[in-house]
Amino acid sequence: MTTFVDTHVHFHFPDYDQDREAAIQRSREAGVRVFINVGTDVKSSEEALKLAERYEDVYATAGIHPHDAKDAHEEDFSALERLLHEKKEVAIGEVGLDFFRNLSPAPVQRKVLNRFFEIHRKTKKPLILHIRDAYGEMREQVQNELSPPVAGVVHCFSADKDIMKSFLDLGFYISFAGPLTYKKNDSLREAFRACPLDRILLETDAPFLPPQSKRGERNESGFLLETAQVGAQIKKIKLEELASQTTQNAKRLFRL
């Protein structure tokens, strides 16, 4: 059976309170063998870790989403840094810049991201970057504050191949989610086509962003298969090759 790693899912979110166990089991049956369960603030990161400690095939991350940057306090960074020393914690994230919705002021987002870059330097854990309408600003902050090559991933990539290349040059992996399958996303498919196979990751970002055939539904990790099938068609390779390579990539980045 072809197997995959979902490198970005939020199975601890309330969206799954009624059927979490069943949703995870369905995803396993669909071929997802490893789940990276991503935190978005201190409470969410703690819940992500609890879930990871319950299931052998689930790992956790710890971070503060840029939407929540305005609510971050110094003790939060200390709490998250402590979490990152736990055995099943594999990354810092999700953290980043989101200037599309601007739910936190841009200067605050940058300041919070700077603190996570400091934690990245101390812990050596890879970064999971959330970037929306802020690719140029993120590239500049990475270049100013970190020393490439940077261990990390641009999660749910949504820009074009030229922007993608600038992040590849900084050392990042590029992760593709359900939007790869959306009918109007030709530029994203072009980026996927141009991305080196050894730098591609796959994710769902579940419960968000279901693939084309599931639009309007709650997403779950098992739906990763549709994104992978489209990706294999774009690359003109067998699904098994994409599965094998992206699994190797995920294991390399997250040290699984």
Image (cartoon, rainbow, N blue to C red):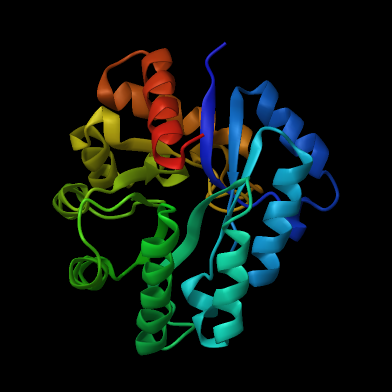
| Residue 22 placement (x, y as % from top left) | 81, 35
Determine whether 22 is above or below 65 in the image. Answer: above
Give the side of residue 227 with respect to residue 137, left or right: right
Give the side of residue 206 with respect to residue 164, left or right: right
Which residue is pictured at 23% across the width and 42% down the height? 191
Which residue is pictured at 59% across the width and 68% down the height? 80
Q: How many marks?
A: 0
Which residue is pictured at 36% across the width and 76% down the height? 114
Q: Is residue 69 visible?
A: yes
| Residue 142 placement (x, y as % from top left) | 24, 66
Give the side of residue 135 with respect to residue 57, left or right: left
Q: Residue furthest right?
A: 18
Q: Nearer the viewer, residue 208 or 67?
A: 67
Quarter of the image holding residue 84?
Answer: bottom right
Q: Nearer the viewer, residue 170 or 74?
A: 74
| Residue 1 placement (x, y as % from top left) | 57, 10
Which residue is pictured at 20% across the width and 69% down the height? 136
Q: Is residue 72 visible?
A: no
Quarter of the image holding residue 28?
Answer: top right
| Residue 167 placement (x, y as % from top left) | 21, 53
